[in-house]
Amino acid sequence: MRSLLVNIDHVATLRNARGETVPDPVHAAIVAEKAGASGIVFHLREDRRHIRDEDVHRLRRVVKGLFDFEMAATDEMIKICIDTKADLVTLVPESREELTTEGGLDMKKVREDYRKRVFPQFKKAGIAISLFVDPEEADIAIAAELEAEAVELHTGTYATADTDARRRVELDRLRSAAIQAHELGMKVNAGHGLNFDNIQPFLDHVPHLADISIGHALIADAVFSGLENSVRRMADIIAE
Ligand code: PXP
């Protein structure tokens, strides 16, 4: 069954912009789960630009659904992820310069390191592994060979495609990748750049989907679904 995982990183970005305690990403996680999210995903980055270590521990205490820890496979992150007993780890490439995750893992490059160093630690800890991959046949095959429980298909190229023809090509690639991953026995997760405009064609075209991670579009939409109320409340107080 398909379900929504809400990525709360951007709530932390807003908090950190002012060095304040609000908006609190943990509060966002509680609201998201109450509203129907089946779990929460966050990316603890090496530079801690949004989510911080203490957020992870606080989130672990309140999240009731799936606790999906997105991270680069560094020794530091592996230790934090195992210590917090995440339900799922989503491994992504990470570079300091990027504004957001820019693409799937280079599976050929990480294959041996993951096999020898990374997978054994998560397997021993009983944490399921999802690999963030581009919808490429060779990458999905390596994910299966490593015995990943899931792949998260990178939907960013679909989301940024600027013509109908390109969008169709990307949807076909995602569809083939989803079928391949499913036939190889892996769960098919997906995410990056999905929003209220592009989600329906994606759902209509791509089978076997499980957890779909969405962050930026939800936080962006929430500003405008909430701003009117907030301004009215404050204007009423001031006018009284
Ligand atoms: N999945 C992964 C692996 C990501 O890195 C991100 C962005 O943090 C998302 C999903 C969510 O993407 P967006 O914020 O564009 O919805």
Image (tube, grey):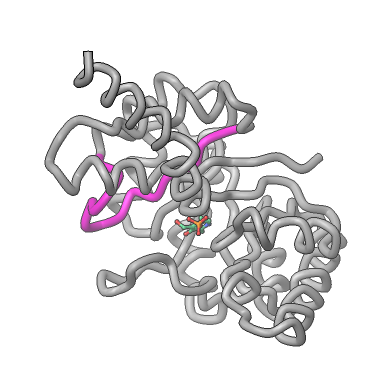
Please name whichever residue, 170 or 91, is drawn nearer the observer in this view of the structure: 170
- Please give the name of the residue rendered at 42% of the width and 34% of the height, measured from the top-left corner: 228
Q: Is residue 122 above or below residue 240?
A: below
| Residue placed furthest toward the front | 239
What span is colored magenta in the figure? Answer: 39-52
Q: In which quarter of the image is residue 42?
A: top left
| Residue placed furthest toward the top | 240
Q: In this view, does 200 lie to the left or right of 54?
A: right
Q: Where is residue 197 in the image (x, y as percent from the top left)?
A: 66, 60
Which quarter of the figure is the C terminus placed in? top left
Magenta segment: does it hold 30? no
Q: Where is residue 145 in the image (x, y as percent from the top left)?
A: 69, 67
Q: Is residue 180 above or below residue 51?
A: below
- Please give the name of the residue rendered at 81% of the width and 69% of the height, measured from the top-left corner: 175
Count of numbered badges drawn on the protein: 0
- Please give the name of the residue rendered at 42% of the width and 43% of the height, measured from the top-left corner: 223
Please name whichever residue, 149 or 168, is drawn nearer the observer in this view of the structure: 168
Q: In this view, does 54 lie to the left or right of 159?
A: left
Q: Is residue 17 above or below residue 165?
A: above
Please name whichever residue, 134 or 11, is drawn nearer the observer in this view of the structure: 11
Q: Where is residue 1 in the image (x, y as percent from the top left)?
A: 81, 40
Q: In which quarter of the image is residue 127?
A: top right
Which secondary structure is most common in the magenta stretch? Answer: loop
- Please give the name of the residue rendered at 36% of the width and 48% of the height, measured from the top-left corner: 10
Please name whichever residue, 181 or 40, is drawn nearer the observer in this view of the structure: 40
Q: Where is residue 76 in the image (x, y as percent from the top left)?
A: 28, 51
Q: Is residue 240 left or right of residue 124?
A: left
Q: Is residue 213 left or right of residue 172?
A: left
Magenta segment: does it hold 50? yes
